[in-house]
Image: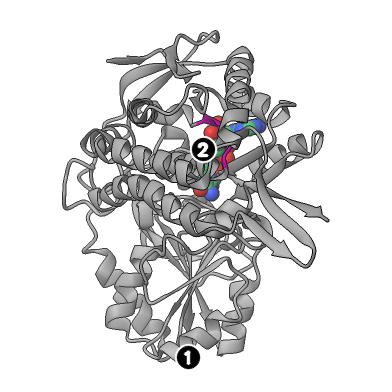
Amino acid sequence: MRTIDTIYIDGAFVTPHGDDRAPLFNPATEKQIGEVRLGDADDVNHAVAAAKRAFPAMAHTTPAERAVMLRRLHKAVAARADDMFAAMVEEYGAPSSFTGFSVQHAAALFEDMAKTVETYAFRRTIGRAEVSMEPLGVVAAIIPWNSTLGFIASKIATAIAAGSTIVVKPSEMSAIQTQVMAQAVHAAGLSKGVINIVNGYGPIVGAALSTHPDIAKISFTGSTMTGRAILTAAAQTFKRVTLELGGKGPQILLEDADLATAIPIALASGFVNSGQACVAGTRLLAPESRLDETLARLKDHIETLKVGAATDPNAQIGPMVSQKQWERVQSYIRLGIDEGATLLTGGEGRPDGLEHGWFVRPTVFADVANQMRIAREEIFGPVLCVIPYRNEAEAIAIANDTSYGLQSYVLSSDLDHAKRVAGQLQAGRVVINGAPHEPLAPFGGFKQSGIGREYGAFGLDGFLEPRAVLS
Ligand code: NAI
Ligand code: MG
């Protein structure tokens, strides 16, 4: 049993004032592996005060100095890659492909932001005006459990790049990963108070940050419902917000797609991070003319996907993060059956051979209508809905008929064709044929998938306020 009983404030690991304790579990075994002591509103006040004291000096640093800080963070985080990998395996259980990506991505984010700082136009001349891009003040970052390392890294990196100081509130379910990250941040040796990390429950620590008068900006990743609560709370003091929320990503399988290559890509996009991903492509739009072939290939390929613990290097789909999340996914599978969709494969319960752990059977629903709740709501598990379409115009209409707009996908053997379709999709990102992540390109959502963008220069814009001096 592991006990995590400190939070990181003003350059030191301190005992929180709060004394709530949350259990930590290994989702592959359901066994309790530890306990985390959580902060409260008093801890938030201390952390914000430390960040506020550190802000003036940080705001006066040059971009070159901040690039040096980011490279120190990069080195310190990269040095803990093995520990981060182990923490993610134990506490989160994602398959090794996703864990490997996450650990590498978390370190790379600091180097990417260093490059952004070096090329970003912090000073611009517009007619008679000299415009400078100024840091907003103390930033709060509120982080979900589904990609803890990457989200903490991207939000810290952007705050540092802007010349801000930051208070981070991770998920209480990610305390082991958070602790390794906090140790890495401490090892980077930035001035005290620049980076603070307070574990705690959303409605306590998250809410205290969202209403705190000395927080100038909130960068949040998580559910649309919580994003709405944060936006409402932030309105009282007009905090700036970047919100990266849910998704119900459409994947348009064009009629000219080569199904032998497209179907494995579609399943990888649908089940990325065991389906616990805002970017997951969970609605597969298939041409009626090729529907039978599509369903047959989906069924065949899904049987080759291994569900298992993160300790199994061959596992491609891991457990859900918690019992609650497992039950939520089960309830959506039941709902799909009740709504009249056809279970092509999968269903309720655990996969054969897995008696313990929050594992879900990879599930594909056929005969799904886009009006069904399983096609409209974020399920956050390995559940794919196949929705047939008659022609391309209808496919585009179905793809855009959603309250979300985070990441969409197009599968085609003709790149120009795919790009023409991509240009009609209401989404912050469109991925063609499983293209890899592009780290400096903007990331974020249209519609209820959020406000603002992360990564690169677009991400930095959201952490800065322009001041025009006219003479
Ligand atoms: P959540 O959105 O409630 O949690 C995300 C973060 O917000 C956590 O750090 C949480 O403590 C914090 N939070 C919760 N309530 C808050 C409040 N009132 N004020 C400030 N911060 C608050 O997500 P949850 O409940 O863990 O998961 C529920 C569903 O949300 C999932 O099944 C999934 O559909 C969706 N989700 C989407 C994510 C994404 O990346 N877009 C990430 C996590 C969940
Ligand atoms: Mg919640």
Q: Mark 1 points at which residue?
A: 417
| Residue 79 within the magenta-colored segment of the rendering | no
Tell me: residue 33, above or below residue 466: above
- Whether residue 347 is visible here, answered yes or no, is no
Dot 1 falls on a residue whose secondary structure is: helix
Residue at the image position 51 percent from the left and 40 percent from the top: 160
Question: In the rendered picture of this protein, how many numbered marks are placed on residues?
Answer: 2
Estimate the x, y position of residue 428 in percent, counting from the top left. Answer: 57, 65
Label 2 secondary element? loop
Magenta stretch: give its range: 163-169
Q: Residue at x 63, y 48 (%)?
A: 242
- Say which label, 2 or 1, has the lower sequence index: 2
Quadrant of the snapshot with the N terminus: top left
Quarter where residue 296 is shown: bottom left
Q: Relative to the observer, which residue lies in front, 128 or 46?
A: 128
Q: What residue type is labelled 1?
A: His
Color style of the picture? one colour
Q: Where is residue 251 in the image (x, y as percent from the top left)?
A: 47, 72
User: The C terminus appears in which quarter of the rendering?
Assistant: bottom right
Question: In the depicted view, which residue is nearer to us: 218 or 63?
Answer: 63
Q: Is mark 2 within 8 Å of ligand 1?
A: yes
Q: Pinpoint residue 117: horizontal percent, then vertical percent.
A: 49, 52
Q: In this view, does 387 lie to the left or right of 137?
A: left
Specify whether 435 is left or right of 424. left
Given the current orientation, which residue lies at the most extreme front position?
A: 471
Label number found at residue 338 = none
Using the image as rendered, state which of residue 356 and residue 75 is in the foreground.
Answer: 75
Q: In this view, does 156 lie above or below 207?
A: below
Residue displayed at 56% across by 88% down: 392
Residue count near mark 2 (Cα–Cα under 10 Å), binned few <14, some 14–19, many ≥20: many
| Residue that mark 2 sits on | 143
